[in-house]
Amino acid sequence: MIDGEQDVVRQRLKDLLAKNLTEVDRTISVYFSQQQRKLDVVVAGLRTDADFRKAQREQPLIQQLVLLDNDGAILFPNLGEPLSEREQKFLMRMERVLLDKDILVAAGGADLNTAGNTAGFQSSSKQALQQSLQQSQPPAQLRGKQSDLKTPPQTTNITPTSGWFTWFWGKGVQLVHWSRRDDGQVVAVCMPRARWTADLIERLPETRPQFVSGSARLAQESSLVRLVDSEERVIYQWGRYEIASDTAPLASVDLSSPLSSWRLQHFGPKEILDAGGRAATTNLIIASAILCVSLLGLALILTRELTRRLREATQRVNFVNQVSHELRTPLTNIRMYAELLATDLDRLNDDEDDNTARRHLNVIADESTRLSRLITNVLTFARKQRSALSIRCRDVVIDDVIQSVVEQFRPSLTRLDIDVALDLDASAPFCGDNDAIGQILGNLIGNVEKYAADGKSIVIKSRQSDGNRIVQIDVVDYGPGIEPKYRDAIFEPFKRVSDRIESATGTGIGLAISRELARLHGGALEIVDSAHGAHFRLTIRSHSSDVSQTESSQ
């Protein structure tokens, strides 16, 4: 009887996990319903070749448009005219779909019993179709009467029925939205995979660690949710539970149309289910729990020590998770914008200007630079933990270092409308570590990007004294500033003014590393009282030219 109750409890827990996945599926379904309504509106207004081509150029949800008549012949693109390279490639990819009239069947415009019976239709092999496309003269079976598009129906009150058609090519599932008009013609819209994938991920829970406590933290650390495609490739995931490659999910739900070949999977420790089952036998062990009272005194002593160790471990875990997210986010953006850039460059074949493509290319460059700075900070911090942090002094010009770092940040500062004012007077040779000084300045300017962008201004000053052996660099912003109670804490590892999700992201080690590098130069990094914003002052001393390496004195 007890085993039966445990099985019932386990099943209810599985049903609860599946219900949570179904809520995520509902979010995905709402997104595609919204896109379907948008495309219905766009398609209803298409009348001529010019309308179709304009929609392809200007609508981000449209990669390629195809207009089919009642028999499956192509009315657009106009096969009686030369095709662009992009149109030829697209028609070649959809060769089998078009020959088998799959879209027409999905739209209810062809007889299911005869849709595949197209002997004459399939008499042209793929090679013949490729040759025909290259000559812009596809087989007659694919050519419709172009006048059908030139003289559209006079009625303007078109209420098309519409839906989704999926087909597989390249990276996996491709989505086609179809709309059937009153005259029987079918408009097929192929959506760019990179675009709808990026939109979808925006609506799913974030991957970043949640800084919460209690049951909410336990739920995060003991679960992982994955969105996988038909080949079990992970499209996206969230949660902090680590699994092996062969781990089976506790619950799994197939997505609704049009992504019915994709699934949501919930992973977690099997002990959760076992714990739920054991709850049914709790009453049997209550008497035994009374014996634990005698151990309470010892438990209190151990709890204090355990709490201290857990606090330290939590700091390390939060740090690793935060860094993982910080490194993953730029990589995700680089990959996504690279795919969007490839699509945009294809559109340039239609004489579209390249502003969008250039903007995406700039994002890739900015994110790559940001990722490089993050990795540099992590590696420097790791060397500090091993007491192996050192500097290599060479003759450098401080003003040149400052200008070089500012130029690295110039694209992102310009995008945020942050003006940079330079007041530089440190042009004499100085013996210091060029990379270390650049890393300090990069961390300070990076903090302005994250926390003081609203100030729209940053001032950087440099001065030399004591026979050019001492350099002072001031970095001043006009943001919200730093409260006095936090001015010491911000230089400690892992310390951030706020760990709230809506606050700016960061690893919490940038200023700690910068202060340590300043001390290795015989100087200091401190925050100075300011009437506005935050004012950081870096002071470093020149090392003798024969010193090639200096170890940390701490």
Image: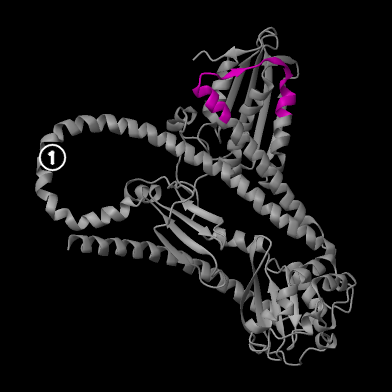
- Left or right: residue 234 versus residue 7 is right
Q: Please say whether residue 30 is one of the residues in the magenta stretch.
A: no
Measured as percent of width and height from the top left, residue 513 is found at 54, 26
Measured as percent of width and height from the top left, residue 355 is found at 78, 56
Q: Give the quarter of the figure containing the N terminus.
A: bottom left
Measured as percent of width and height from the top left, residue 266 is found at 43, 57
Q: Is residue 434 above or below residue 195?
A: above
- Mark 1 belongs to which amino acid? Cys
Mark 1: give few (<14), some (14-19) or many (20+) Cα within 10 Å. few
Q: Is residue 539 above or below residue 330?
A: above
Q: How many marks?
A: 1
Which residue is at a point 69% across and 48% down the rendered structure image?
A: 363
Which residue is at a point 69% across and 40% down the rendered structure image?
A: 419
- Left or right: residue 296 versus residue 365 is left
Q: Between residues 445 and 197, which one lies in front from this camera angle?
A: 197
Is any atom of residue 130 visible in this view?
A: yes
- Left or right: residue 298 versus residue 70 is left
Q: Please say whether residue 382 is one of the residues in the magenta stretch.
A: yes
Give the residue pinned by disc 1.
292
Q: In the picture, residue 38 is in which quadrant?
A: bottom right
- The scheme the figure's colours follow is one colour
Q: Between residues 102 and 519, which one lies in front from this camera angle?
A: 102
Q: What is the magenta range?
A: 379-403
